[in-house]
Image (cartoon, helix red, strand yellow):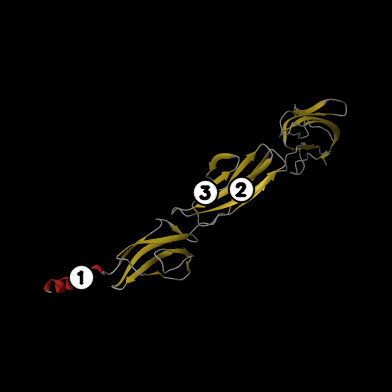
Amino acid sequence: MLKKLFFIAFSIVGSFAMAQVPTANIIVPSNTICTGQTVIFTSITTNTPTSFSWTVNPSIEVAYLSSVNQASTALGFTYPGVYTVSLTVANASGSFTAAQSITISVTPRASFSASLNTIGFPNQIVLTNFSSNATNYAWLFSDTPAVDTNTNTTHDYTSSGAYTVSLVAYNTNGCSDTSDYSFFISDTSGITLPNVFTPNADGVNDVFKPIARGIKTMKVNIYSRYGNLVASWETINGHWDGYTPSGMLCESGTYFCVVEATGFDGKDYKLKGYISLFRN
């Protein structure tokens, strides 16, 4: 009988010893947490808690994206600053609260403008950066693995096709944002010959040059009305300023232009046309 009473007493004491207050440890998902980012906080617990309760202080503009009554919760922060994330766990024996201080950094906003210099190809895109809250940048281009880290930049294209430019703006805390721009460069080449130019040094229409898009090679000869060669070049960006190769001024009048060119698309051009030169 004495042994039985002792066994009952030991069982009661043992059950009280086994029922203990739970503990918890909050696991922070990352050393860098940024505004607008969804982060999942988890916990390691002991002694089998039966309830969980997550809180954040200050709680202004903190979004609970999943239940606060589970062993983990997803949070989103609108504003940067220092916050305290707390988790209270409990069972029949009592409760325990763990707290973790976290710093939220502001996320940059990536933004830029893009402008192509011409129609067709070859072409150049001019990229102007309007990002905010960023200290470093990475320009990514779909046609090359190279990364451009300039604040503003340009990029050349020698063929037609669909392209994408991406700007990654990031800060010293590792927070980042990305903006993309997609565009298409025409696959056709072409040449247009202006028929008038006025080399009078007023900064407007002072040189004659073919308007070219998608042109790989070009040869231009310009003749006077007497058949004398007054200007020639074999470059894409060449032009005539109204003077002979020896530096003599060409008089106002009509001249004759002959152009031979090849486009990047394989098309050949042989153009002829008259040019009117006016100096007044």
Disc 3 marks which residue? 137
- Badge 3: residue crowd in 10 Å (few <14, some 14–19, many ≥20): many
Q: Is residue 105 visible?
A: no
Q: Nearer the viewer, residue 136 or 144?
A: 144
For the point 30% across and 67% down, which residue is it? Answer: 22
Q: Where residue 142 sits: x, y (%)?
A: 60, 42
SS category of the residue bearing label 1 = helix
Chain-order first, disc 2 or disc 1: 1
Q: Where does residue 238 sit, x and y in percent of width and height? A: 72, 33
The CA span between labels 2 and 3 is 12 Å
Residue beneath disc 1? 11
Label 2 close to label 1 by CB (< 8 Å)? no
The residue under label 2 is 127
Residue 181 drawn above or below residue 206: below
Q: Amino acid at mark 1?
A: Ser
Q: Quadrant of residue 173?
A: bottom left
Q: Residue at the spot x=66%, y=43% of the render?
A: 162
Name which residue type carries label 2: Leu
Q: Residues within 10 Å of mark 2 (few under 14, many from 20)?
A: some
Q: Which residue is at the front of the view, 223 or 213?
A: 213
Q: Is residue 143 left or right of residue 75?
A: right
175, above or below 49, in the image? above
Work out how far the residue at label 1 is from the one at label 3, CA to CA, in angstroms.
Answer: 68 Å
Mark 2 or 3, nearer chain start:
2
Residue at 64% over, 48% down? 182
Q: Nearer the viewer, mark 2 or mark 1?
A: 1
Q: Specify whether 14 is left or right of 45.
A: left
